[in-house]
Image: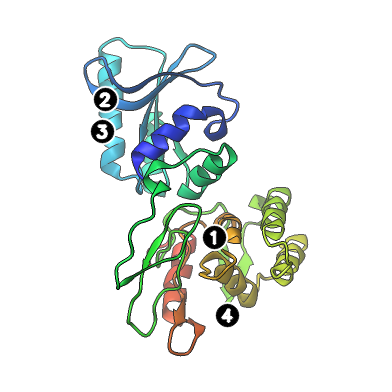
Amino acid sequence: MIEKDMEDLIAAYPDDFCPRRNFVLIGRQRSFAGIGRFDLAFEDEFESTILMELKAKTLKYEDATQVAKYRDELKRNGCTNIVMWLVAPQIPSSVREFLDDKGIEYSEIHVLEFRRIAERHDFVIKSEAEPEKASPSITSIGTAGSVIASRLPRRTRQASSIVSTAPVVISHSALRWRAAGSDLILDNPEKFEPKKFLGLVDRFAAAVRSGKNRSLVNDLKSWADSSRHTPLTSATVESLLRWTITGTTWQAAVPYAYEVSAYLFGTPAPTWKEWNDSERKYEFDAERWRRWFQSLNGADA
């Protein structure tokens, strides 16, 4: 998804992306006070002007500092009642801290959320409307938008996925974990929100009408009932990951599995369980798991 798609969707459906803000669009690609161009400009019910900048990739520190410079310049020019707002699919914790310190609003909105809102409104995402032409080295794995995955000859090719993956956590969950072997124990159960979590699990359950995910759903619900005292088993985590990075006919359930995983562990999805083409099975990579686990609580991998 490109920034123009993000801009089109937020401009058309601001209440879906920023509920209860009552944003009214007043401009697009607008130069403001001669200091910079912003993707979107809104006005809220308090007559504040919201200048929104969109990034289609992980937000960088340089992006945040640039907007902070714009904000400082606006203040020097005597502009008041202006809110600076950054939107990106991933915002690292260090960048969040900087934005909080500078009083700049931000929203982390994953590509899947843009696609979900587009589907809700029968909105065509232009950059994904036409499938890319496959070459002999490419295979299409069709999703809500056309997703193209390389057919890699390596022994351990990553399974086809329609979600972002990485060896370590970039955007962290509020939950913190410690290991008991390969099982995970919740270290801050006071941060766990059972109602929210079970709602995500129910959405995942409903996405597979055949009930093929029933065993995992039951395991997740059982853990939620006793999360203060019961480890989240490695088998449950691995099963959830398989649903998250699946390349099978159950792709419709992937976004919902990803939501559950993101709530528990943050994003992107990990890469410690890979598909072995020659063996036709998933394989666990202990070293990658160790690196991912170290990143769970914000530690350097």
Residue 89 lies, with reference to residue 209, above or below; the image says above
Outermost residue toward the left? 34
Q: Which residue is mark 4?
A: 181
Badge 3: how crowded within 10 Å, few (<14), some, or many (20+)? few
Outermost residue toward the bottom? 279
Q: Which residue is mark 3?
A: 66
Mark 2, secondary structure of its residue? strand
The residue at the point 57 percent across, 78 percent down is 182
Q: Which residue is mark 2?
A: 37
Label 4 to label 3: alpha-carbon separation: 44 Å
Q: Amino acid at mark 2?
A: Arg
Label 1 to label 2: alpha-carbon separation: 36 Å
Label 1 to label 4: alpha-carbon separation: 17 Å
Q: Amino acid at mark 1?
A: Phe
Q: Amino acid at mark 3?
A: Gln
Q: Which residue is mark 1?
A: 265
Residue 247 x, y percent position in the rendering? 51, 69
Residues at circles 3 and 2 in contact by the CB criterion of under 8 Å: no
